[in-house]
Image (spheres, rainbow, N blue to C red):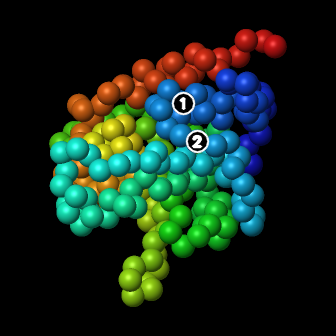
Amino acid sequence: MKYQFKAHPTVFEGVQYRSRLEATWAAFFTYMDWSFVYEPFDLQGWVPDFVLRGRSVSRPKWMKAKTFAALGGKKWGSREILVEVKPSWNHFDQSYKDTILCATDIDAKILLLTQFEDRPYDEYQCWDGFGGLLLERWQDEDGEQGQENDDAALAHCIVCKQTTIISASGGWGCRLCGAYDGDGLIHPCEYYTINPLDVWKQAKNATQWRGY
Ligand SMILES: [Zn+2]
């Protein structure tokens, strides 16, 4: 079934977005201090709405150089997440996901977003869901390939020092820098420096319809 939504082009910080929802997510990324580019490139059959880019990270002062090297620290910060925003989940059926997966590289990380949803994902771990779905492709050393499809959650990464995106029940590595939870680098949400729900409200406010 196709749903028709009338998109209101909306400006945020000098950039015009095709819809208010896209502008609101752009505002959310901005206030979360996540680095992003709107419509970064065309892929074969799919144009991502955004790419989120990990900020460059250097070795934390408290971490020994040897540990940093062993954890793959040289590669931290180089991560990218491709983002697609749609008004509702009806848009993200399997054929749409297949189109995206066909268009992307073997190790692509894709975040599907509709609206921010405030819900604790896991009370024990205190990961917060925020209404995103992570679609990820992977390839191991033996060349075996696969894909994961899991709720995205928010947590605090002590390497890139920000609230970051993890997979709620899969790999808990920081998707914005590559630091891994198993190494004690990803912390639950009581470590947040900012409250994501407040950030979303602020983003909604900044992009509300003003009748022009
Ligand atoms: Zn990180």
Mark number displayed over residue 30: 1
- Is 158 located above or below residue 95 in the figure? above
Q: At 67% from the left edge and 23% from the top edge, which residue is drawn?
A: 13
**Looking at the picture, which amino acid does disc 1 mark?**
Thr
Q: Position of residue 203 (x, y in %)?
A: 55, 23
Left or right placement of residue 136 versus residue 97 in this view: left
Mark 2: which secondary structure? strand
Front-most of residues 160 and 155:
160
Q: CA distance from mark 1 to mark 2?
A: 8 Å
Residue that protrudes farthest toward the bottom in the picture: 142
Residue 171 appears in which quarter of the rendering? bottom left
- Position of the C terminus, as image quadrant, is top right
Q: Position of residue 17 (x, y in %)?
A: 73, 33
Q: Residues within 10 Å of mark 1 (few under 14, many from 20)?
A: some
Front-most of residues 162 and 110:
162
Labels 1 and 2 touching (C-beta < 8 A): yes
Q: At 24% from the left edge and 66% from the top edge, which residue is drawn?
A: 70
| Residue 127 visible, this angle | no
Q: At 52% from the left edge and 48% from the top edge, which residue is drawn?
A: 53
Q: Residues within 10 Å of mark 2 (few under 14, many from 20)?
A: many
Mark number displayed over residue 36: 2
**Looking at the picture, which amino acid does disc 2 mark?**
Phe
| Residue 59 visible, this angle | yes
- Is 167 located above or below residue 7 in the figure? below
Q: Position of residue 127 (x, y in %)?
A: 29, 42
Q: At 58% from the left edge and 28% from the top edge, which residue is drawn?
A: 27
Mark 1: which secondary structure? helix
Disc on the earlier residue, 1 or 2: 1
In the image, the residue with mark 1 has its CB under 8 Å from the nearest atom of ligand 1: no
